[in-house]
Amino acid sequence: MVYPTTVKTYLERAASHPNAAARKLLEIMDRKKTNLCVSVDVTTSAEVLEVVRNVAPAVCMVKTHIDIISDFTPALTEELAKLADEFDFVIFEDRKFADIGNTVALQYSSGVHKIADWSHITNAHPLPGPGIISGLGTVGKPKGRALLLLAEMSSKGNLATGEYTKTAVQMARDAGRDWVVGFIAMGRVDAEGDPEGKEDFLILTPGVGLVAKGDKLGQQYRTPREVVYDSGCDVIIVGRGIYGVQGGREAVLAEAEKYREEGWKAYEERLTRA
Ligand code: S5P
């Protein structure tokens, strides 16, 4: 069976989305013809900005791990925000919150990183229960931000399977799509319980590579086509497969373009799938 959400265009889905950050993302995807998110997992401010400037034309989203930056100052996130406006992409801080509501609200709003001030979208493990969603919501909702739950993971042997995944989806349903806009997942975890595709959650999927099949630490890769066409996911997240290529600035953009094209082709094909 074809899950109805996967045969709707990103723009159609934007029109009816209640969350401002999700709407912005879907509109950008349509405008720039890209479902590619580049994961910028490098460890200095200069490297982050260099990778972002290189790939910016090809992406709808840039994903950060702000806590791996060794020389972090707020100037970095100010510059990222400027680039996001200039090149038309959203910022996803991949913080993977995993504590009680009160603590995550502090981690999201405070400290040196002040994530809620600059990151359009962030994510959380459902492990602590619904309090994590409400805690983050006290900070993010008034700012028009969006939250994703990790319903599945790409790494070998992970525990986010079966009942855990189902409960994660239920937690998102209970919270409402105006705040929890979707999932980190490997496929359409939302299809069961919504056969007509009325909810329209976003599925963002890491573990994407055109060449490598995995790394030495349990990461597992699938191709953009497997992720977008076969599994019906919405955004492909690519890290080392893009910023890790040799050959400097042009090679990195060329690689990003390759992923963008593959991801977009798979999306267009799935729209017309019978
Ligand atoms: O299950 C997951 C969830 C995430 S968000 N598996 C992942 O790999 N990620 C993130 O995606 C991970 O933290 C990293 O930033 C990125 C994948 O990087 P790559 O270099 O393997 O493409």
Image (cartoon, rainbow, N blue to C red):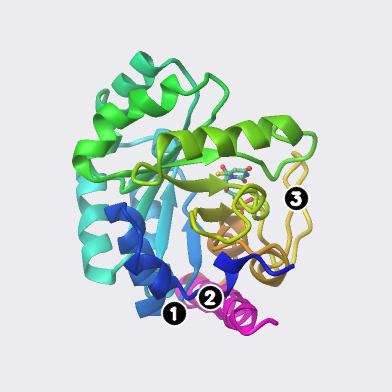
Q: Is residue 23 visible?
A: yes
> Which residue is drawn at the image coordinates 78% and 39% (left, top)?
156
Residue closer to the observer: 130 or 149 = 130
**What x and y, as percent, mark residue 91?**
35, 53
87 over 33 or under it: above or below: above
Please state which amino acid type lies under the numbered disc 1: Lys
- Disc number at residue 8? none
Left or right: residue 84 versus residue 225 is left
Q: To which quarter of the image does residue 217 belong?
A: top right
Please state which amino acid type lies under the numbered disc 3: Gln
Label 3 Cα neighbours within 10 Å, binned few <14 / some 14-19 / many ≥20: some
Left or right: residue 172 versus residue 101 is right
Considering only order in the chain, which callout, 2 or 3, is on the residue closer to the N terminus? 3
Please state which amino acid type lies under the numbered disc 2: Arg
**What x and y, as percent, mark residue 54?**
40, 69
Q: Which residues are magenta?
A: 249-274
Quarter of the rendering occupied by the C terminus: bottom right
Residue closer to the observer: 14 or 110 = 14
In magenta segment, residue 239: no
43 over 19 or under it: above or below: above
- The secondary element bearing badge 2 is classed as helix
Q: Compute the Cα span from label 3 to label 2.
A: 20 Å
Which residue is under mark 2?
260
> Which residue is drawn at the image coordinates 54% and 46% (left, top)?
183
**What x and y, as percent, mark residue 151?**
61, 39
> Which residue is drawn at the image coordinates 64% and 54% (left, top)?
191
Which residue is under mark 1?
33
Discs 2, 1 touching: Cβ within 8 Å: yes
Discs 3, 2 touching: Cβ within 8 Å: no
Label 1 Cα neighbours within 10 Å, binned few <14 / some 14-19 / many ≥20: many
